[in-house]
């Protein structure tokens, strides 16, 4: 969920006012400077950026734990710093179900698995559905 879309649109409303993010039904507070919310089930994003950063004692991201990591970023410069290992996203939480309510009549840029669209009022819910075995080639 982006406050900007490819740098071509600008908004008079902050993302924290336009959406409500709930983790397992409980709303979380978005800081005023958050321009994008990213829901992950992988340890990397956008060509290898580690948005979660080093695991802490409470949570180590894993594709097989049936949990989603939710992070916020403050803009493209923030994403750039993470791409070169000079930062991490703001950790918003971990959940088995993430709901995002779009509260504004103004459409918001959304992207799922590389496919962008403009989202009007409504709700998106992300939760575990199924899991498939994957193969990985050797590192040699």
Image (tube, helix red, strand yellow):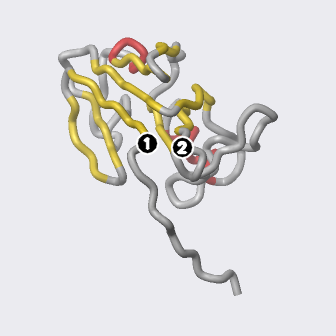
Residue 103 placed where, x, y %? 27, 14
Q: Can you tell which mark lies on residue 66?
A: 2
- CB under 8 Å between discs 1 and 2: yes
Q: What residue sits right under mark 1 in the picture?
A: 128
Q: Earlier in the sequence, mark 1 or mark 2?
A: 2
Q: Residue, x 48% and y 14% (percent of image)?
A: 26
Q: Nearer the viewer, residue 15 or 137?
A: 137
Number of residues whose C-alpha sits closer than 10 Å to that of mark 2, classed few (under 14), some (14–19) or many (20 or more): some
Residue 52 placed where, x, y %? 65, 41
Q: Nearer the viewer, residue 5 or 118?
A: 118
Element type at mark 1: loop
Quadrant in the picture for residue 8? top left
Q: Residue, x 41% and y 37% (percent of image)?
A: 127
Residue 17 placed where, x, y %? 37, 12
Q: Is residue 112 left or right of residue 27?
A: left
Q: Residue, x 33% and y 16% (percent of image)?
A: 18
């Amino acid at each position: 969920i982006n406050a900007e879309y490819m740098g071509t649109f600008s908004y008079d409303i902050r993302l924290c006012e336009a959406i409500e993010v709930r983790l397992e039904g409980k709303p979380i507070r978005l800081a005023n400077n958050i321009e994008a919310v990213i829901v992950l089930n992988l340890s990397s994003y956008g060509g290898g950026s580690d948005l979660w950063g080093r695991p802490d004692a409470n949570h180590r991201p894993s594709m097989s734990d049936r949990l989603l990591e939710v992070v916020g970023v403050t803009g493209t410069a923030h994403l750039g710093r993470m791409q070169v290992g000079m930062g991490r996203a703001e950790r918003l939480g971990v959940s088995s179900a993430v709901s995002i309510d779009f509260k504004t009549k103004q459409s918001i840029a959304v992207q799922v698995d590389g496919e962008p669209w403009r989202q009007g009022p409504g709700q998106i819910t992300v939760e575990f559905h199924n899991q498939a075995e994957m193969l990985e080639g050797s590192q040699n």
